[in-house]
Image: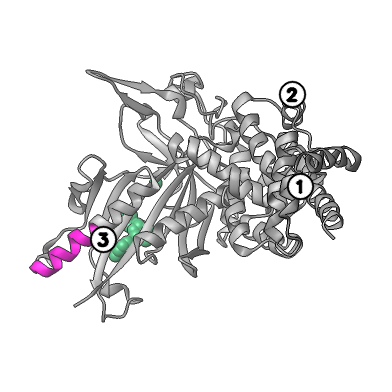
Amino acid sequence: MGYRAKIGLEMHCEISETNTKVFSSARNSYSVTPNENIRAIDMAFPGILPVVNKEAVKMAIMASMVLNCQQPKYMYFERKNYYYPDLPKGFQLTQETKPIPVGIYGHVDFECNGKVCRVRINNLHLEEDAASSDHLYDTTVIDYNRAGVPLLELVTDPDLTSADEAVAFLEHMRTVYQYLGISEADSKKGQIRCDVNVSIMDENLDPEEPSNFGTKVEVKNVNSFGGVRDAINYEIKRQTKLKEEGTYDDMPQQTRRWDEESQSTIFMRSKVDAVDYKYFVEPNIPKFKLTDEWLEEIRKSIPELAFDRKNRYMNEYGLSEYDSDILVKEKKISDFFEDTVKLGTDPKEACNWVNGMILSYLNYNMITIDEFYMTPDMLHDLIKLIDDKTISSKQGKEVFAKCLEQQKEPVQIVKDEGMMQITDESSIEIIVDEVLAEQAEAIKTYDPENPKALDYFIGQVMKKTRGKANPSTAYKMMKEKLDNMTK
Ligand code: ADP
Ligand code: MG
């Protein structure tokens, strides 16, 4: 018998684009220097009150709207009580038991392997991140930079059916957060973390009927999309084996963790040992009203998202769906492309460079567009040099490589290296005549019917000009002269 997987995700994404933290006035900025962005409240000093960051609420509401969720009329925060060295207050401010956090009951459509999938969103809530523990050789130290960073937690219904779908959904959400301008959503900076819930059920039962669902296994704190893929595939395999051995029904609802090293999930605790967080409404933050006017204002400020950009590239610029998809995948790449086009570059040419040479360069060197030396201005100049035939397209590739290698602008390289193509007809004619004067023997065997017969003569022209003669002018001129001479 076959089985069907049911997968639900709890995706945490740090909001990285507010100036300050969610309830504290400390700077909200990624830093590798420990304990740089902290205020007394982040360290849990007594007597200091939280103040809600309006910008963070606005960004959270914006995400809630894009996820087609219902928004609340009033907002509350709650204490989730537990102690951890990196949670010195002894509670996390979050939203859990009140009916509407920043959003409930939405849905998201995304593409996976060429087909459109829909996942329902159970809820979206705003909370604060905890500090982080760094485990050194024989000691553990706490870095409070992360304490109080705004965190959005999105909880899906168990609608996803495979590791591929789960990863495609996460990639889609990363793009949404980037385009909304609320987060870099960079998993390398730990800005995205997921809990993955997996169960399997018999394939011939009704997949929509919750009583048919299998027992949920939660895998906590998976920190990369690759990890999400591997953890889901591992769990499906592990649970399928339990079904086949006949012990699946004895398996308790449980929490496991993903262990990178052994590439397996490891049992942490069963549901009966679940922690009681004793939630209650945070008394120091009065509930506040979200007016219809403010919500409307937020809705109007939602920027163009990847999907709309992609359609615009196809309709306005005539780019293929394939190319448009690649361009919009990372907002910063798409912005680089747009900035180049705004300078007057033909969109198709800009797209060929960005999706071709530039992306290969970034991938090969494992750098981001932020670390890329070339700017949209330089790409614009480079394409212009080729278009107005100052250099050939072959030389264009050379200039591209040298620009990055020497950190010099394309225009400068062409000047420094004397790469300007010879396009002026009278200069080319002088060279053509020189070659003809030297090649009396070869002219005797010239066959005007054979298109390849010209190659040798053009080769001589290129040799004399070190490849700089404009090939089509040289070709045309050489053919005319040879045809006349051998008539
Ligand atoms: P809990 O009360 O244990 O926190 P929830 O019902 O709130 O559980 O769901 C938490 C996550 O688990 C959600 O993402 C949800 O989609 C997912 N989930 C719930 N039931 C299942 C199941 N049977 N199989 C897989 N995932 C599930
Ligand atoms: Mg949570």
State yes or no: residue 241 in magenta.
yes
* Residue 21 lies in quadrant: top right
Element on which disc 3 rests = loop
User: Mark 1 = which residue?
Assistant: 471
Element on which disc 1 rests = helix
What range is drawn magenta here?
235-246
Name which of mark 1 and mark 2 comes first in the sequence. 2
Q: Is residue 155 left or right of residue 183?
A: left
Q: Is residue 484 left or right of residue 25?
A: right
User: Mark 2 = which residue?
Assistant: 416
Amino acid of disc 1: Pro
Q: CA separation, marks 1 and 2?
A: 22 Å
Q: CA separation, marks 1 and 3?
A: 68 Å
Q: Residues within 10 Å of mark 2 (few under 14, many from 20)?
A: few
Find residue 216 and name its label: 3
Name which of mark 1 and mark 3 comes first in the sequence. 3
Circles 1 and 3, Cβ within 8 Å, touching? The answer is no
Amino acid of disc 3: Lys
Amino acid of disc 2: Asp
Ligand 1 near label 3 (Cβ, under 8 Å)?
A: yes
